[in-house]
Image (tube, rainbow, N blue to C red):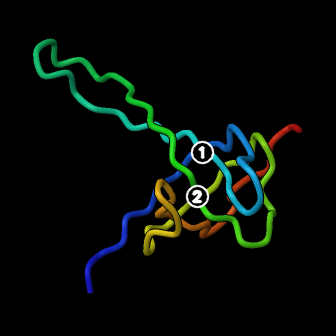
Amino acid sequence: MALKREIQGVVVQISGNKTANILSERKVVHPRYRKIVKRFKKYLIHDEKNELKVGDVAVAIECRPISKRKAFRLKAVLSTGVE
């Protein structure tokens, strides 16, 4: 069995029923300047129980493709947001 990727990010948008849009941040070393820079990417994740709100910090795990752009499902909600 292959290892499944886990991503952590902040919920930036609720994108329809059972779907949330999270913004994931990673730090990489710039190839030329050797400085640590932030890289951001948005992922659509499957939220079966519609428990996420904007501002929550969530962990998602890789799964089979659920739709064209959705291949992660909600694993846990780490903290709740302000809204």
Marks 2 and 1: CB-CB under 8 Å?
yes
Residue 19 found in image quarter: bottom right
Callout 2: helix, strand or loop? strand
Q: Residue at x 45, y 37 (%)?
A: 41
Residue 74 found in image quarter: bottom right
Which residue is disc 1 drawn over? 22
Q: Residue at x 58, y 58 (%)?
A: 45
Quadrant of the image containing the C terminus = top right
Q: Residue at x 39, y 38 (%)?
A: 26
Work out whether residue 57 or residue 67 is closer to the camera in this orientation and state it. Answer: 67
Residue lying at the far right in this picture: please name it: 83
Answer above or below: position of 52 versus 66.
Answer: above
Answer above or below: position of 11 versus 71.
Answer: above
Q: Which mark is residue 4?
A: none
- Mark 2 belongs to which amino acid? Ile
Work out whether residue 9 or residue 49 is closer to the camera in this orientation and state it. Answer: 49
- Image coordinates for residue 34, horizontal then vertical, percent: 16, 19
- Image coordinates for residue 38, horizontal then vertical, percent: 39, 26
Q: Residues within 10 Å of mark 1 (few under 14, many from 20)?
A: many
Q: Number of marks in the image?
A: 2
Residue lying at the far bottom in this picture: please name it: 1
Callout 1: helix, strand or loop? strand
> In the picture provided, is 71 more to the left or to the right than 37?
right
Quadrant of the image containing the N terminus = bottom left
- Image coordinates for residue 32, horizontal then vertical, percent: 10, 15
- Image coordinates for residue 49, horizontal then vertical, percent: 79, 71
> In the picture provided, is 24 more to the left or to the right than 5?
right
Q: Residues within 10 Å of mark 2 (few under 14, many from 20)?
A: many
Q: CA distance from mark 2 to mark 1?
A: 7 Å
- Mark 1 belongs to which amino acid? Ile
Q: Which mark is residue 45?
A: 2
